[in-house]
Amino acid sequence: MKKAMIFDMDGTLWDSVDSIVVSWNAALQQMGETDVTVTRPQIMSLMGNTMDVFARTLFPHYTPEKGAQWIDILGQIENEFLSRYGAVLLGDVKGVFARLREMGYGVYIVSNCQAGYIEGFLEYYHLEDLVDDIECYGNTLRGKADNLKLLIERNHLDEYLYLGDTQGDFNACREAGVPFLFAAYGFGRVDDDSVPRIQKLDDLPEYLQERA
């Protein structure tokens, strides 16, 4: 039986919001887009959404096509920034991944981020050898539920659990038929108090042992 732990990125594995704010504002100024400035609360409110939602929210004065172009440019700049400077990890990510693999779990990541974002995270923290596969909105232009199904089918997974931190994550898992574990330490919340949860990332291996 092929077991897997599938992770969300933002609010689950790391907090990259301040890095996004710094890199995006610098890029917007350099490119002459002085009417738009992003803040941490604004980016926090958008975290978990697909990049087309970012475009519509931040660039409502542009056509959808031009807004998407701006988000693509900012995403590339953000990827470069994160691959050089990293962000704030929300626990012992490398230790947890290594422990999961010792326990017989494959490690996977599915996010609504742009292409290259997960790769920058893996590169900066030297996690490539611990993660079996990834999928994201930027690669497929599809939402999280579809990308979860794609990754599960592609890797022939038999038993799996998704760790995420928002209602959107929970909804996507329900749509995809994927069991959900709430990262209660993350950015968001879920409306269903009966949803299983962990209070910190480092508790995950023990939770899985008790669940087995």
Image: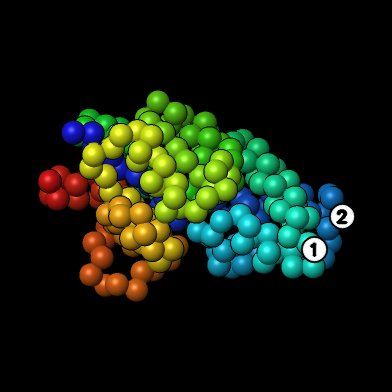
* Crowding at mark 2 (Cα within 10 Å: few <14, some 14-19, many 20+): few
Nearest-to-viewer mark from 2 and 1: 1
Query: At 30% across and 55% down in the image, what residue appears?
Result: 177
Query: At 44% across and 50% down in the image, what residue appears?
Result: 146
Amino acid at the residue labelled 2: Gly
Q: In which quarter of the image is residue 5?
A: top left
Q: Position of residue 51 (x, y in %)?
A: 61, 54
Q: Where is residue 64 in the image (x, y as percent from the top left)?
A: 73, 60
Check the picture and name the quadrant holding the N terminus: top left
Amino acid at the residue labelled 1: Tyr
Q: Is residue 190 visible?
A: yes
The residue wearing badge 1 is 62
Q: In this view, does 150 lie to the left or right of 33?
A: left
Query: At 35% across and 33% down in the image, what residue appears?
Result: 155
Q: Is residue 123 left or right of residue 185?
A: right
Element on which disc 1 rests: loop
Q: Where is residue 101 in the image (x, y as percent from the top left)?
A: 27, 32
Task: Find residue 32 and name its label.
Answer: 2
